[in-house]
Amino acid sequence: DSGVTQTPKHLITATGQRVTLRCSPRSGDLSVYWYQQSLDQGLQFLIQYYNGEERAKGNILERFSAQQFPDLHSELNLSSLELGDSALYFCASSIRGGLSIQYFGAGTRLSVL
Amino acid sequence: GESVGLHLPTLSVQEGDNSIINCAYSNSASDYFIWYKQESGKGPQFIIDIRSNMDKRQGQRVTVLLNKTVKHLSLQIAATQPGDSAVYFCAENKVDSGYALNFGKGTSLLVTP
């Protein structure tokens, strides 16, 4: 167990809908990262937050947004969902935002039908 | 372009043998490299990391070698066990991307009895 908790484990929804994925980092970790894993694109970095502030953006679509709350948990919001958004979404956390080990949660499997 | 790639998509080894998983990177500015193991249905699990000022680092049954001259990274697993069967990813953690991870495509390691 990495100590990173993601909910829900599975999510099935329809095209055009909006969902929220939740992540609780390891105790003491200030930085949260979101990644998307799909069969054709592999693991892709989406966005990073550090102590409540956005630190870096990767290949995140405009339909996606995220935030990190004062208690350091993070949410990834996916809207106007398309079939191609079906993937595994992982959250990772690290103690700081620099060169430190990122610990991954078990992921949320999103299926858009 | 800048990428982290893997030489072999699949690797089959016999139990007890040593395994070597290779990875090539193209960005000479990369200063931190990480190996992750991902079992089916789980998130990536940290194995070992190495900074660019090192050539070798050892862990429990694992060794990571970094050859900056040819931009090559390898993961050696000693006395491979059935529990080592998984997909292995190398990733680089670049300073100019907010310390996000850029993952390779992964190598599937299958350990046969």
Image: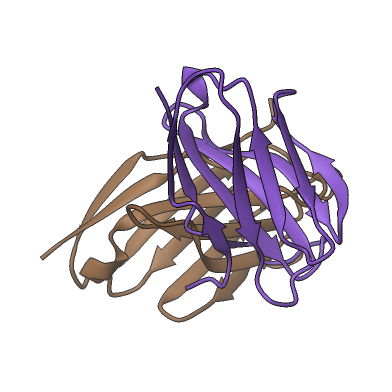
The quadrant where residue B67 appears? bottom right
Instruction: Say whether residue B31 is visible.
Output: yes
* Image coloring type: by chain
| Percent of width and height locating residue B19 | 33, 62
| Percent of width and height locating residue A78 | 63, 32
Residue at 70% over, 68% down: B54
Q: What colour do you see for chain B? A: brown
The N terminus of chain B lies in which quarter of the figure?
top right
The quadrant where residue B32 appears? bottom right
Residue B15 against residue A10 in the figure, above or below: below
Using the image as rendered, state which of residue A9 and residue A56 is in the foreground. A9
| Percent of width and height locating residue B15 | 18, 68
Instruction: Say whether residue B69 is visible.
Output: no
Q: In the figure, is residue A63 to the left or right of A7? A: right
Using the image as rendered, state which of residue A109 and residue B87 is in the foreground. A109
Residue A90 against residue B17 in the figure, above or below: above
The C terminus of chain B lies in which quarter of the figure?
bottom left
Q: In the figure, is residue A1 to the left or right of B57? A: left
The quadrant where residue A69 appears? bottom right
Q: What colour do you see for chain A? A: purple
Q: In the figure, is residue B3 to the left or right of B95? A: left
Residue A88 against residue A51 in the figure, above or below: above
Residue at 53% over, 41% down: B104
| Percent of width and height locating residue A39 | 41, 31
Residue at the right extreme, as displayed: A53
